[in-house]
Amino acid sequence: MTHFLDINKTDAADLRAIIDQAAAMKQARAGRPRGAPDDEQPLAGRMVALIFEKPSTRTRVSFDAGARQMGAQTMVLSGADMQLGHGETIADTARVLSRYVDLIMMRTFEEDTILEMAEHASVPVINGLTNRTHPCQIMADILTYEEHRGPIRGRRVVWCGDGNNVCASFIHAAGQFGFDLTFTGPAQLDPEQVFVDEARAKGADIRIERDAARAVEGADLVVTDTWVSMHDSQSSRERRHNLLRPYQVNDDLMSHAAPDALFMHCLPAHRDEEVTSSVMDGPQSVIFDEAENRLHAQKAIMRYCLVV
Ligand code: CP
Ligand code: NVA
């Protein structure tokens, strides 16, 4: 059984193969209408369930469109409308769904939910975001960086702001793809130490730097994300904004990065909070390529899970 649960749980060689496959599949359908099938139909006859316990635009539409391009049929399910949201266990849900579908992608709150789903499903499970990680996003980000600037190995990524789920998967990727990462943000919102230790053990240079301008000095890629994630309470909003304001990505901060540095954001963004519109819409921003590459990266991930 080949699940895709986290970047640190898939072999580095397989991750590299997924990125290369994504680039090849993207190239193979360049210029075609969005709804046109791929020449190869590796998911023909397959049924894919996409379960959401949290809102989503990109993950929902890109998984659905991508699975269909590869020949699968899809169903998008809201967790709240399933018995899952009314007391049926994850384990029983996993066993039942495995009788109907060939692949389960799930966006949920607790990491344990996705782990339990994977443990009890007899079909592959893909993590479409938990409170703790967002691996599919970072696969799209690696694809995007490499399309624009070549191999990410040895490059320096700077994460600005909240040490959240997307940051965690970036740190996983530093260890697996061999790049260095500096986290700059308030100590109260540091990424979990276990992510940092693991990436360091794999040879990545992971630094924590409280001064944003110093952190970004010479960076190849500057990344940020929302200051209040879906799992954060609204009552923490003001405190988070006050802590994070010095870490806004703006033109002044970007001027400290390498001249050819890129800017990324997984979206949705809160314009002029964590990042200014001038950076989002400026020449260094590749945010909409990132969004597009969710489609291509996830197609390669589904293929990896389903095609032996
Ligand atoms: N980046 C991302 O996962 O977007 P959605 O929440 O819209 O799926
Ligand atoms: N950190 C954000 C990412 C959204 C794609 C959240 O979890 O809400």
Image (cartoon, helix red, strand yellow):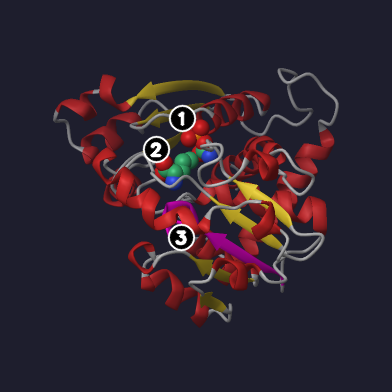
Query: In the structure shown, which secondary structural element does the residue marked by tag 3 occupy?
Result: helix
Instruction: Using the rendered image of the protein, determine whether residue 124 is visible from the camera's viewpoint.
Output: no
The residue carrying mark 1 is 56
Q: CA distance from mark 1 to mark 3?
A: 19 Å
For marks 1 and 2 on the same chain, the one whose residue lies earlier in the sequence: 1
Say whether mark 1 is within 8 Å of ligand 1: yes
Residue 147: image x %, image y %?
A: 80, 51
**Quarter of the image holding residue 73?**
top right
For marks 3 and 2 on the same chain, the one whose residue lies earlier in the sequence: 2
Residue 292: image x %, image y %?
A: 68, 35
Identify the mark at residue 107; answer none if there is no mark: 2
Q: What residue type is disc 1 on?
A: Ser
Q: Are marks 1 and 2 in contact (CB under 8 Å)?
A: yes
Query: In the structure shown, which secondary structural element does the residue marked by tag 1 occupy?
Result: loop
Nearer mark to the viewer, of 3 and 2: 3
In the image, residue 198 sits, relative to residue 130, either above or below, namely: below
**Quarter of the image holding residue 180?**
bottom right
Q: CA distance from mark 3 to mark 2?
A: 16 Å
Name the residue rendered at 83%, 35% in the picture.
Answer: 28
